[in-house]
Structure formats: structure tokens, C-alpha cells
Image (cartoon, rainbow, N blue to C red):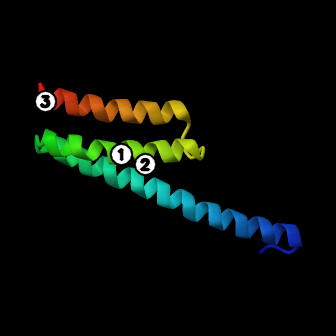
Amino acid sequence: MAITKSAKKALRSSMRKRAFNLRRKRRISEVTKRIRKLIAEKKTAEALALLPAAYQAIDKAAKTNFLHKRAAARKKSRLAAAIARVEK
């Protein structure tokens, strides 16, 4: 348990950041799971419609340094490539 004043403030801050980070992580995983499920069902049109939502979630995570910018680019690229593979 935090004893000093600064430790208590750090604890409050880290709990707030944790809530934001969990929200970002959950949003990315929900959208990517939904897209991958649609890809497995060969519903490319619906997967393509969800792609902007995935890009938005990933970009917001990268903007706030939750994800590294190259990791974000890699995730977006792999989602798009997976959809393209099914379209062929």
C-alpha cells in the first residue's frame, strides 16, 4: 500500500492509465476478432466494412504510445493482407 503522498498520487495515476489502456486493448482485440471471424466465413465485404474501425482503434493506440507505430502499421497491414488473400 502506498504510504507517501507522491506514491498515492502515482497509484491514482497508474490506475487511471490502466483503465485507458485496457479500454484500448479491448477495442483492438474485439474489432480484429470480428474481422478474422468474417474472414474465416469468407465474408470479405463485411470485413472490408469493419476495416476502418480497426484502423481507427489501432491508430488511436499508436498515437498514445500504447502500441509502437511500427507495430500498429504491422497489425493494419496483416489485417488488410488477410482480407486480400480471401478475396482472391
Q: Which residue in the structure is indicated by mark 2? A: 57
Q: Which residue in the structure is indicated by mark 3? A: 87
Q: Nearer the viewer, residue 41 or 61?
A: 61
User: Residue at (77%, 75%) from the top-left corner?
Assistant: 1
For the image, the number of numbered tags is: 3
Cα–Cα gap, marks 3 and 2: 24 Å
Q: What x and y, as percent, mark residue 37?
A: 20, 48
Where on the picture, by quarter, is residue 26? bottom left
Q: What x and y, as percent, mark residue 11?
A: 74, 68
Give the secondary structure at mark 2. helix
* Vertical placement of residue 17 versus 55, above or below: below
Q: Which residue in the structure is indicated by mark 1? A: 54
Where on the picture, by quarter, is residue 48? top left
For badge 1, the amino acid type reads Ala
Sequence order check, earlier mark of 1 and 3: 1
Give the secondary structure at mark 1. helix
* Vertical placement of residue 52 versus 85, above or below: below
